């Protein structure tokens, strides 16, 4: 690799959000492994994932498709079929162990202990039932109330998520809602039982930027109202900068960097995070060429030896003794901040990435 100076990654400014999160973790994931047996071999979708999240805090899980971010969050919700998935490790939500729960226990847990907003509301909402009926069904599954009270609750939730004239719109079908309104209805359904953990799996991907901003603000406002912990799955670092307190970067089923949003976006400690930031186009100032990550993510049937990112890493030759190819690095603190960790053999990534002077995006 050339010794020429490497251009520093562009980063993203963040609107500060004051959240007084409790230090006690509400969600605790410890050494989570998710594997899928196939005719071609074992798909190692998640490998030894550990993190924790207190109430009133938002954790963004980022990475390319196939990195394991959605698979890990579906495990938190107990959505994997145990007949086709092998899950080990520990997932505790509010002190309750999720791994090993029976289907009946999971049904009682979902919607109350934790709830999930999916990427595509069109496929998540049943086309033959009204929006109100679907919210009411979710509410009555956990509360012994009449249909009248359940409908009143559905109308209240639709109003809270910004649906105009909720008394009338509660009787509409999904096809009568716009994409943004369907996503708001999904959020209302997810929060109707006041869960303390909300998982949002790329809920703004299919929306235009104006509606996207509205949905992000809505989730942040509702988090303050409900005091929830939020896991936000996305590939959009602009979204991360706006809504998250902390970031967990995943690659090939592994956590490769974890820490506060401003520090990771400002001074990345892993080449993959650096590459993600380098792929963001500049919106102001002097135009700069993009610096995309070379190659493609590896197959989870055959994860590379050593550091899984080494076949695509531009800095692997700066590590002596061929460690990147032969030894998998541990996820360890890489700075004076004990809450920040990365999985990399580079001794001084700050110097390598030239992060002392960073171009910034508005």
Image (cartoon, rainbow, N blue to C red):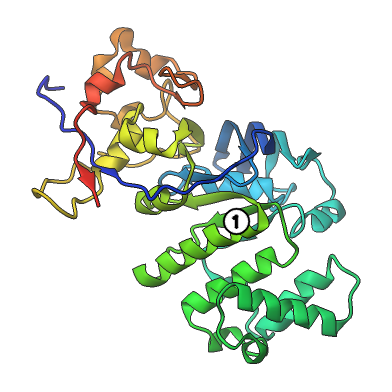
Q: Quadrant of residue 295?
A: top left
Return the x and y of residue 76 as percentages of the image width and height: 67, 46
Residue at 60% x, 55% y is 224
Above or below 292: residue 308: above
The reply to whether residue 1 is visible in this rendering is yes
Return the x and y of residue 159 as percentages of the image width and height: 62, 78
Residue at 37% x, 30% y is 309
Seen as rendered, the residue at the extreme top is 321
Q: How many marks?
A: 1
From the viewer's perspective, is 42 left or right of 252?
right
From the viewer's perspective, is 338 left or right of 130?
left
From the viewer's perspective, is 101 left or right of 77?
right
Near mark 1 (Cα within 10 A), the count class, few <14, some 14-19 or many ≥20, is many
Residue at 69% x, 81% y is 155
The reply to whether residue 125 is visible in this rendering is no
Residue bearing mark 1: 223
Seen as rendered, the residue at the extreme right is 144
Name the quadrant of the N terminus.
top left
Above or below 262: residue 337: above
Residue at 52% x, 51% y is 232
Q: Quadrant of residue 327?
A: top left
Return the x and y of residue 216 as percentages of the image width and height: 47, 61
From the viewer's perspective, is 337 left or right of 353?
right
Return the x and y of residue 25 as percentages of the image width and height: 67, 36
Nearer to me, 306 or 102: 102
Give the secondary structure at mark 1: helix
Nearer to me, 238 or 47: 238
Nearer to me, 126 or 16: 16
């Amino acid at each position: 690799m050339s010794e020429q100076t490497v251009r520093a990654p562009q980063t993203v400014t963040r609107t500060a959000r004051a959240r007084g999160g409790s230090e006690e973790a509400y969600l605790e994931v410890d050494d989570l492994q998710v594997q899928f047996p196939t005719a071609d071999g074992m798909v190692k979708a998640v490998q030894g994932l550990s993190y924790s999240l207190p109430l009133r805090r938002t954790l963004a899980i980022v990475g390319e498709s196939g990195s394991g971010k959605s698979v890990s969050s579906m495990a938190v919700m107990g959505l994997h079929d145990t007949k086709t998935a092998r899950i080990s490790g520990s997932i505790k939500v509010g002190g309750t162990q999720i791994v090993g729960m029976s289907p009946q226990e999971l049904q009682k847990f979902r919607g109350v202990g934790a709830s999930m907003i999916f990427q595509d509301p069109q496929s998540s909402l049943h086309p033959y039932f009204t929006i109100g009926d679907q919210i009411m069904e979710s509410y009555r599954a956990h509360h012994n109330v009449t249909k009248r009270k359940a409908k009143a609750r559905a109308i209240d939730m639709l109003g809270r998520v910004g649906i105009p004239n909720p008394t009338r719109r509660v009787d509409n079908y999904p096809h009568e809602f716009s994409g943004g309104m369907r996503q708001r209805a999904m959020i209302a359904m997810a929060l109707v039982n006041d869960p303390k953990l909300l998982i949002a799996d790329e809920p703004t991907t299919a929306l235009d930027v104006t509606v996207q901003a509205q949905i992000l603000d809505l989730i942040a406002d509702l988090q303050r109202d409900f005091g929830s912990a939020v896991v936000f799955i996305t590939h959009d670092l602009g979204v991360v900068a706006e809504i998250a307190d902390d970031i967990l970067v995943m690659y090939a089923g592994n956590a490769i960097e974890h820490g506060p949003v401003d520090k990771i976006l400002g001074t990345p400690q892993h080449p993959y995070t650096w590459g993600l930031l380098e792929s963001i186009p500049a919106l102001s100032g002097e135009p700069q060429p993009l610096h995309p990550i070379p190659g493609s993510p590896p197959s989870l049937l055959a994860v590379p030896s050593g550091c899984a990112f080494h076949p695509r890493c531009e800095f692997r030759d700066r590590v002596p003794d061929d460690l990147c190819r032969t030894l998998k690095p541990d996820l360890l603190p890489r700075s004076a901040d004990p809450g920040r960790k990365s999985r990399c053999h580079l001794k001084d990534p700050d110097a390598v990435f030239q992060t002392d002077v960073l171009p910034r995006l508005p």
